Each structure stands twice: as structure tokens, then as C-alpha cells.
Image: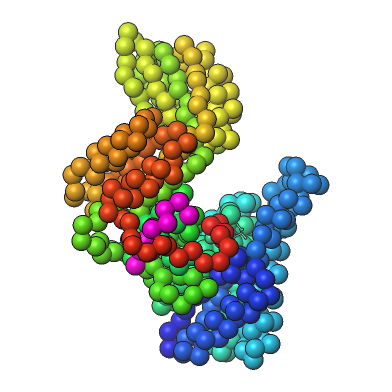
Amino acid sequence: MSLLVMKFGGSSVGTPERMQRVARRILERQQEGHQIVVVVSAMGDTTDDLIDQSKQLNPNPPAREMDMLLTTGEQISIALLSMTIHQLGGQAVSYTGWQAGFRTEPVHGKARITDIQADRVIRSLDEGQIVIVAGFQGMSEDGEITTFGRGGSDTTAVALAAAVQADRCEIYTDVDGVYSTDPRVVKCARKLEEISYDEMLELAHLGAAVLHPRAVEYAKHNNVCLVVRSSFTYNEGTEVKEEAVMEQGIVVRGIAFDKNVARISLLGAQDIPGILAKVFGALANNGIDVDIIVQSGVADGKADFSFSVSNNDIAKALRVIEDLRSEVPFREATSEENLVKVSIVGAGMVSHPGVAAKMFETISQLGVSIKMVSTSEIKCSCVIEAGPLNEVVRALHTAYNLDTEEQAFVGGPQDRRE
Ligand code: ASP
Ligand code: MG
């Protein structure tokens, strides 16, 4: 008998009818002879609605109370799903994250899992129960309720799959699998049969919201057999694995984009040793995530450099830099908002020269200028202005032979963050 973890996102359980569909799907899987652990997210927009409610009463709620509030969303889902399964004649038991043995760091809002004591889950499985676990939550050593950050139910599923040594972890969502790019932007985007952990990790970090990056990290680390598929159809999904086969003639597996990018430039900075360390040290100490860094030449002992941050960090980053002026003298700091980062990802890039060059050429043919570039062995990212983003993504999709004949199936309501 094999052991399966099935995870359903918020839109898959968003209404009573969908809850019933999910319950039937779970029972079908059980009848095929599998033991089943289910992980669910909060129904529909529940988490967003809870956040809105809290903001009306306190725009800056204590992080502890926020976790207390948000974990209720998943608790509603597990109880209702379990009842639905009982109504259909099945045996199920629901557990909160802490009942299922999730121990985490003592951090609110983005806790990491430190340990999973899954004996209770295993015992219930052995009794023939379908075990339903609330996503994205755990408890710290000192008994405080914690959450894993938005989209964290994927991580619950993968971590639990590793802990109970499941044969497979299936992530059910509202799209058919992982696509070469967002099918809403490129109609002829292709569904990928397979993708490697590393490629998926890049895509997830670069803005493809279909899987939470930490879940992919966990899967890679524990070699979890991970499948992304639709809860609305029976189509085969996308398998995420150690090594994925590349189709003939395709080097780039996917194109991702991030619409929340700003550039800050520091001009005429005195080129003394340690200046980068000072600037980026100060930014890090203030919790500002810096992505791409470009130093663009030194003349007459003065250096210019730029870096990218998310739009909402601009004001803070400029303040941090201004505060450093006495230590790191510079002429001026400028910023540019509302940029986007487009990235191509493919494990085959390492061994195929000219992949990045083709990206630059394709973008320049559209008359769009590239403001920043960063590369790794398996990806190349360009920061450009936001206006022509869709056009650029479509052109790249064609240039790298990713277009298919068919129109991509996009099932259910779009909830790319579920
Ligand atoms: N309900 C949480 C969220 O909306 C966790 C999840 O869905 O994965 O972010
Ligand atoms: Mg999700």
C-alpha cells in the first residue's frame, strides 16, 4: 500500500461544492488503495479577508495575534473537509498543525519548521483514517502558535510527506501544472511534464506563484516526489524531480517575471575599500532585501553603482543610504520605481552558449532597453521598464521555442497564490 499526501489550495475548497468535489477525489484515491494524508489551505479568500478585518481594528497588529487569527482559516477548512468526508461515508480525522506535530522556530509570520513529530498522524493512518492537517501552521518550543508565511501550506504538505515517508506529494491547485510561463500572458504557454527541483526553485523565487519556494527547497532536500496538478481536471500534472528530461531543441524551460522591482543608484561614491560592505551591510541590518547589484565603473576615484529592491522598500533604502553619507560620501542617490524583472530558467543553459545573448537580442529588437542583468548557471534575469513586459515575455517564449499549438488550459478561478 502506498502513502500519499494530497494538498488542496484555497480556491480548490472555496465553496461547499468544491469542498465536496475535493472530498470525493480523496475517497477515490483511497479506494485505489492508498493511505491518505491531506493538507488544506484556508477557503477561498479567507486569509486575505482576515487580514483586512484585522487592519480595520489595528493597522499594526501584534505578530503573535496575527498568527492566532490567520491559523483559524485553515482550522475551518480541516473541520469542514473532515465532516464532508464523513457525510460521504469515509473515515477522517482533522488535526491542527501543532496536533500533527509541527514544531517551529519561535518566530511569528514566517517561522521555519524545526521538527515534525508525526506519530499521531501515523497512528491515525494505521487505524484507517484519512488524516487532514491544517496548512501553514505549527507551534514553537514555548507553546506559541506560529505560521510559515503566505502560501506556506505547500511547505506543510512537502514537510509532512518527508516526515511520514510518503511515496508521493500531490499539490492540487487551480491550474493543470507548472507552465512555461503565466498562461494569462502567453495563451500558447506549455504545460511542463517535468521540471527539476533547481529549475522550479528558481521559477518559484522569480515570481511563478504555483509553488512556495520553501516547499521546493524541502522537496529537493528530502527527495520528495512532488506533483503539481489540477483539482478541477484529471489531467496529468507536472512532476518536480531531481533531473528532468529536456525536450529536443528546448534549452529554456520557463520564463518568470516579477512586477515589483525598483532600482536605486548611488552616483559618485568615494571609492574606498569596504564601501560595498558598508552600504549593503546597512541595508541588510535594516531588513531590506537587495536583489541585483551592478557596479558600473570607477573614474577619478569615484564609483557608481546600482541595485534593485522591491518597490515598497525604496523610501526605507534611500533613508538608510542618506544616513551613511558621512561614512560613505557620495554625490547623489536616485531611484526608479515600477520596473520589472524578466527571467529565463533552464538547467540546459550551462552547456549551451548564446542563450543569454538571444535574450538580450530579443528584448532589444522590441526597442526595450535593459537596465540591469544578473545570471547564474541556470537563469538569466533582465530588469526592464514595466510597460512592454507582456510583449517581452511573449517574444521570449517564441524565441526559445516554447510556444505550443494549443491554448493553455486555465481552469477554475485564478488564484495564483493558493
Ligand atoms: N492560507 C495561507 C495563505 O493564504 C496559506 C496558504 O494558503 O498556503 O497564504
Ligand atoms: Mg500556493
Q: Is 146 in front, or is 345?
A: 345
Residue occupying the point 71% across, 64% down:
72
Residue sitting nearer the eye, 239 or 360: 360
Which secondary structure dominates the residues rendered in magenta?
loop
Q: Residue at x 69, y 60 (%)?
A: 46
The stretch drawn in magenta includes residue 186 = yes
Name the residue at the right extreme: 57
In which image quadrant can residue 298 be found?
A: top left
| Residue lying at 33% horizontally and 60% vertically, measured from the top left | 404
Residue 39 lies in the magenta stretch? no
Residue 247 position within the rendered picture, expressed as x and y whole percent measured from the top left: 24, 62
Query: In this rendering, does residue 29 appear at all?
Result: yes
Q: How is the image coloured?
A: rainbow
Please tell me whether residue 46 is drawn above or below residue 4 in the rendered image.
Answer: above
Where, quadrant-wise, is the N terminus in this rendering? bottom left
| Rendering coords of residue 325 (x, y %) | 52, 15
Extent of the magenta region: 184-193
Q: Residue at x 41, y 34 (%)?
A: 384
Using the image as rendered, state which of residue 30 and residue 393 is in the foreground.
393
